[in-house]
Image: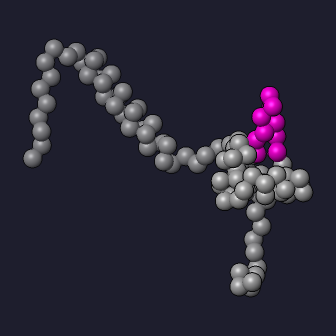
């Protein structure tokens, strides 16, 4: 059974604005689930290590060996999410058993 809504002392313009605001809010919430994160999203060293499930020491070693590139600004160090994903290499199916 459908609920009825009584609109008292609401102008057509106010009703229209309420509908527009409601639709915008729904679309904004839905968009969070459909748009991928930005490819060049910056990660802190801690976030990058957590994403890769490695220690900060291992992350520093990989940066030192040139396996990953770090970026800095204002004394802070960042890694690009896209760089991390590009650094991943496909493994030979036979290598999984080793």
Seen in the picture, residue 32 relative to 73 is either above or below; the reply is: below
Residue 10 position, x and y percent, is 20, 16
Q: How many marks?
A: 0
Residue 84 position, x and y percent, is 75, 54
Q: Nearer the viewer, residue 51 or 17?
A: 51
Seen in the picture, residue 22 relative to 36 is either above or below; the reply is: above
Q: Can residue 68 be seen?
A: no
Residue shown at the point (90%, 57%) measured from the top left:
65
Seen in the picture, residue 20 relative to 81 is either above or below; the reply is: above
Give the residues drawn in magenta, as a range. 70-79
**Which residue appears farthest toward the right when viewing the image?**
65
Q: Nearer the viewer, residue 18 or 62?
A: 62
Horizontally, residue 58 falls left or right of residue 39, namely right
Residue shown at the point (75%, 71%) measured from the top left:
90
- Magenta-drawn stretch, dominant element (helix, strand or loop): strand
Residue 4 position, x and y percent, is 11, 34
Name the quarter where the C terminus is drawn. Answer: bottom right
Residue shown at the point (36%, 34%) measured from the top left:
23
Give the quadrant of residue 29: top left
Q: Can residue 42 be seen?
A: yes
Q: How is the image coloured?
A: one colour
Horizontally, residue 46 falls left or right of residue 58, namely left
Residue 78: within the magenta? yes
Residue shown at the point (82%, 40%) measured from the top left:
71
Residue 59: within the magenta? no
């Amino acid at each position: 059974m459908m609920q009825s809504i009584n609109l008292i002392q609401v102008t057509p313009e106010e009703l229209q604005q309420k509908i527009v605001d409601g639709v915008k809010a729904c679309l904004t919430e839905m968009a969070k689930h459909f748009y991928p994160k930005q490819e060049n999203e910056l990660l802190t060293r801690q976030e990058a290590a957590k994403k890769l499930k490695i220690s900060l020491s291992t992350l520093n070693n990989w940066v030192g060996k040139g396996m990953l590139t770090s970026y800095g600004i204002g004394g802070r160090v960042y890694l690009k999410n896209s760089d991390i994903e590009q650094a991943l290499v496909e493994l030979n199916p036979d290598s999984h058993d080793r």
